[in-house]
Image (spheres, coloured by chain):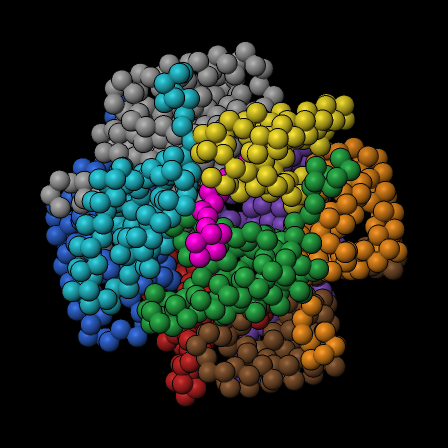
Chain colours: B blue, D red, E purple, F brown, G cyan, H green, I orange, J yellow
Amino acid sequence: MEFLVRSENRLPPTTPPEERERLRAAERERAMELRAQGVLKRLWRVPGRNATIGLYEADDATQLHDALMSLPMAPWLDITVEPLATHPQERGTS
Amino acid sequence: MEFLVRSENRLPPTTPPEERERLRAAERERAMELRAQGVLKRLWRVPGRNATIGLYEADDATQLHDALMSLPMAPWLDITVEPLATHPQERGTS
Amino acid sequence: MEFLVRSENRLPPTTPPEERERLRAAERERAMELRAQGVLKRLWRVPGRNATIGLYEADDATQLHDALMSLPMAPWLDITVEPLATHPQERGTS
Amino acid sequence: MEFLVRSENRLPPTTPPEERERLRAAERERAMELRAQGVLKRLWRVPGRNATIGLYEADDATQLHDALMSLPMAPWLDITVEPLATHPQERGTS
Amino acid sequence: MEFLVRSENRLPPTTPPEERERLRAAERERAMELRAQGVLKRLWRVPGRNATIGLYEADDATQLHDALMSLPMAPWLDITVEPLATHPQERGTS
Amino acid sequence: MEFLVRSENRLPPTTPPEERERLRAAERERAMELRAQGVLKRLWRVPGRNATIGLYEADDATQLHDALMSLPMAPWLDITVEPLATHPQERGTS
Amino acid sequence: MEFLVRSENRLPPTTPPEERERLRAAERERAMELRAQGVLKRLWRVPGRNATIGLYEADDATQLHDALMSLPMAPWLDITVEPLATHPQERGTS
Amino acid sequence: MEFLVRSENRLPPTTPPEERERLRAAERERAMELRAQGVLKRLWRVPGRNATIGLYEADDATQLHDALMSLPMAPWLDITVEPLATHPQERGTS
Amino acid sequence: MEFLVRSENRLPPTTPPEERERLRAAERERAMELRAQGVLKRLWRVPGRNATIGLYEADDATQLHDALMSLPMAPWLDITVEPLATHPQERGTS
Amino acid sequence: MEFLVRSENRLPPTTPPEERERLRAAERERAMELRAQGVLKRLWRVPGRNATIGLYEADDATQLHDALMSLPMAPWLDITVEPLATHPQERGTS
């Protein structure tokens, strides 16, 4: 099942640069693992913001939740999840 | 996977009573079928409104969508769907 | 009477891990007591968030309030409560 | 249990005057019955609007819902209900 | 003139318990004085929140403002005030 | 007591011009009466909209409500009223 | 450049079935053309609603606008467009 | 003084094509006049919507209002106006 | 040109009393100067809040901005400005 | 492609004056560079706020994002970006 995941990064601007970079590197690494597992399919940057919109796929919201909570930045992420239904045009039948 | 489904019924007040009753009866009948299939698990009335909050279960949002669109009142329903993840307290393991 | 309770946990990310775990354990314990009393009936995780949606039952909003305030995390919880009316389909008569 | 009930009257301005007056008279009559039963305790007009705020008392949201739906204007009323908990200052004990 | 006063208490969770209790006691005392003066007529707790809804009466918004600012918790209260007009049903004439 | 009154005019664009002009003339006439009584003190147009912001004075919200409902356009006006408290700078004393 | 396009279909429920089906067929046909041109890349149904979320690609917002206005349902579509920036993880370089 | 003017065109989809085209032509003509007078400086289309964002210049909000109301589509336009202050970087002095 | 200026004062409750009083006194003094210049015409308190609504007059938004930024409390003020157009009833002509 | 960029500056009021001035100077310098590159075309101040509205031009949202993130104040800027489509009146053809 696919989900649209909107995520605002609330890491305070006063966070020490090294800590920020450490978290960023760990985040990128974890994201690559989720891509490899087919959980994270596309990721876009919201222009002008420290925020992303992502296309995720998971068996259900519980698996998605665990994946999102496994992100190192999770404690500072303000996330909203939208469930996506397959459109008839993409069900092959229509 | 469970979903919380909020539904406002926009059937105009000027709808002829027989038409309203026909739709209501058909709606109740279809709802019973969905209950029998385990898709509709609980349904509450929002006090003071022609609106409901329902607990649904479906394989994914696509199956849920088809179930909701199969309701006779669907053309007049203003629906928002929230995905629900299983809470650790209810995962049996925690 | 049943209530839908939406709760966002605002415990700051900078809270020391031991303190967070202590609160979590106490929260789980108290939640189990509320389940035993039939006050907390179902609890879901909002995917991607440190937030829950719960189905509660209490005599009235006052009893519900006391139950919610008895949760160890209460000072950091941003809670909204929605009253639920029994739907005709579940009143046994229809 | 007490509830705060906000109600906007969406009866169209083009409603024939006699029909409007008939509904108003029936509404006042029904309101008096609800007052007599102790369900409707206080009613205020929102200044400048065809809208009211009411203090209601009912066993639960289901009973409140039935009372509100018994109002002749119900089909045109856009109602939101807020549950009220007794404040410690008014629990007699404090 | 009557007013509906919604008040969210933003006193931080980290406030030392004695300070919190001192403020609470002073708040209750002041509230009793306002009740005695007929300014505070009813007070409800918003279930699940450190927030209240109150029915106040004052000559005008200026007198109401002074009464609300006289509350010890005022610096931490996020208050919205709604003016209430007397409903024809309660004007004695209708 | 002073009030800030925001009013959107929802008279449909398809209203016959003569009817619109009749209502406008009657509205202007009634407004002049309210000015003469000191109820309507200032009136501004919201640029680009068929809407106004007005400064009104009345004994209380009930008197204000009656004044606003006496406007010929009242059935098509979507009005929100804000109570205004006298600022210390304008209380003469400060 | 990629865009996220949210579209609510406001075609009234009272639209004659043949007209609705004619529009739907024409819409599907036009959508296939846009897919062939690489403008429409992915399309999802918002569960429970006559609404879609689409991933589009166009040189700029002007080209996107023309593509969206070329849809037969365009007069009844309530569309909001969000610009998407390429995320560092998908820029090949990171 | 410059203003940012956001305008949603609510002309119903069921408007006869000739009437729509007549209004459009008249709108374009009036817009050219406003450009010639330096009142309308820039105009953009909001992608996917029958809506525009415009940069206007007028002595004050009253002159702007009259200019906007002179547009043939004015009765169907839902307009919001934002005042713009000159930024220090564009005041020549900074 | 007239403007309606809504201003919420976010000065933290924990600000030392002397600092608060110093700022207040300086604010009152500056406000009197703006009144003398005809820039600040009326000022109301929003009941229950550390917030004001003011009627200002300035040549344009740039002059208004400079006046508002000259207020000692400016760094803690959350201000929204609404442009006001003269209503036909107050243009002397109508 | 043109974009409308709304930016609220959340730099805390308690920021030391020198730090604030250093950032401001660097911001002005960077803005001039963006103007020279044709990326920043117009910039307005939102009256009464530490906020701007800007007209930007970039190949796409990715290039715009990089430009905005290159601003020294970026970590404290709360930015929303709106894509702008060319209006027929400004396409030269109409």
Q: Which of the 4 image quarters holds residue B74?
A: bottom left
Query: Is residue E75 something one can see in this rendering?
Result: no
In the rendering, at what x and y percent does residue G22 appear?
Answer: 18, 60
Residue at the spot 65% in from the left edge and 84% down from the top edge: F29
Front residue (pair J1, G44): J1
| Residue extending farthest front | J93
Residue at the spot 20% in from the left edge and 72% down from the top edge: B19
Question: Quick check: F74 left or right of J87?
Answer: right
In the rendering, at what x and y percent does residue F36 appear?
Answer: 74, 81
Question: Quick check: B58 left or right of F12?
Answer: left
Front residue (pair J41, F27): J41
Residue at the spot 44% in from the left edge and 57% down from the top edge: J94
In the rendering, at what x and y percent does residue G79 appear?
Answer: 37, 51
Q: Which of the 4 image quarters holds residue J39?
A: top right
Q: Which of the 4 image quarters holds residue E75?
A: top right
Verify whether residue E87 appears in magenta: no
Quarter holding the N terminus of chain E is bottom right
Verify whether residue J85 appears in magenta: yes
Number of callouts: 0
Q: Is residue D11 above or below residue D83?
A: below
Q: Is residue F24 above or below residue H87?
A: below
Front residue (pair E60, I89): I89
| Residue extending farthest bottom | D18
In the rendering, at what x and y percent does residue J8 appear?
Answer: 61, 38
Front residue (pair D7, J49): J49
Question: Quick check: D2 left or right of E7?
Answer: left
Query: Is residue H23 something one can see in this rendering?
Result: yes
Residue range of the region highlighted in magenta in the rendering: J75-94
Residue at the spot 87% in from the left edge and 47% down from the top edge: I29
